[in-house]
Amino acid sequence: MINLSIESIKRLLYNKFDAVNSNSYNEYAGIFVVNCKRLVEYIETNTILKTLINKIEEEPVDFEAWDKFLIMGMGETDYLGLEKDIHICWKVLKRISELNLYTSKNNGIGDLIKFGSISRFSSSNNPSSGDNHLSVIVRRYIEPLTYYLAEKLNTELAVIYNIDRFTRRTREFDKELLSEMFNKNTQNGENNLDSFLRKYLFDQGIDTISTPKFYEGRTDILIESQMKSPDSVVIEIKLFKNEGNYKEDYLKSGFSSQLQPAVIHHGRNYGILFVFNLSDKYLEFITIDGGNPPKMIVGGRTFYIMHTDIYDKHKSSSVAKVETIKIDCRSWLT
């Protein structure tokens, strides 16, 4: 699978939306529906956009009841809140994409208008009334959905997705490079690895800033989104060597004394403890809420534990013999 940067995903998303918007005229209903199909297909086949959609679909809405309410000509129900409204926008786009229309003029506009979702905006449900029903659908449903997804691409799900790719990349291609980077300058090794991760995120279109010191400590990376959203992420980077000062207590301190206070201080909902494993062991993190990556939900905030192995002497022939250290993160909360 090709790894598209966040900016590339946004650009392709906007391109698909522009194709829908540029054909949002009643006489081109068939072309409009075909482009809606293409937009839905792109969203559902892009891993990160599909993850965002899955989260949207977790927000409960009674779409059928909502649709019938509009068909009765009673206008929209009360505003249900952002997440529920975006779920409705997605349902409308999906419903349109499921229509079986041709690309010829004046075909199928009646099928589109039967969605009561546009009745309150139109002077008539008659396709010949002159109302541009498709433009209304774009403004009310497809445009808000598109911009919502684009804005969410710098939040926690996008960051998790890209850091997961970073862990796989380092294990496959950069293990020796990073191990050497640390060993050449152990005094600044953690900062150098921090910079390596930061540069990778930047190349994926994710902006990061170094967080300033504050009274409860300091964490390493703050992900900034255009929304300044609480859904953006704080990242704390730690090393693990299973010796000296770089044992489990070092990770616990990073979690409890730096990551948790920083997430609260910056008003965020998500934090990541990212561990560069320099030991010759594999790591397994046991958390309260499990998952992949493992996570712990504390005080309504979600904390992920992620790591990559950069010890460069693991041989494929001896993988089965490598010991795994299990770290019980649940004890960090006591």
Image (cartoon, helix red, strand yellow):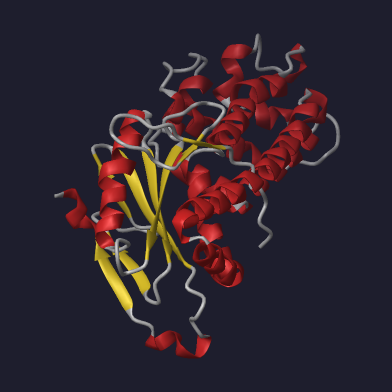
In the image shown, does 302 or 169 lie closer to the viewer? 169
Is any part of residue 193 visible from this angle? yes
Q: Residue furthest left?
A: 334
Q: Residue at x 66, y 19 (%)?
A: 136
In the image shown, does 46 or 276 lie closer to the viewer? 276
Q: Residue at x 86, y 36 (%)?
A: 104
Is any part of residue 57 visible from this angle? no
At which x and y percent is residue 115?
A: 59, 27
On screen, 144 above or below 278?
A: above
At which x and y percent is residue 188?
A: 48, 54
Q: In the rendered view, does 321 fall on the left or right side of 51?
A: left
Q: Quadrant of residue 147?
A: top right
Q: Residue at x 38, y 29 (%)?
A: 266
Task: Tell me the quadrant of the picture where the N terminus can be found.
Answer: bottom right
In the image shown, does 243 or 234 lie closer to the viewer? 243
On screen, 18 above or below 304?
A: above
Q: Residue furthest right?
A: 104
At which x and y percent is residue 267?
A: 36, 28
Q: Residue furthest bottom?
A: 317
Could you tell me how many numbered marks the image carries? Answer: 0
At which x and y percent is residue 206?
A: 59, 41
On screen, 309 above or below 82?
A: below
Q: In the rendered view, does 177 fall on the left or right side of 221?
A: right
In the image shown, does 67 or 266 lie closer to the viewer? 266
Q: In the rendered view, does 57 fall on the left or right side of 1?
A: left
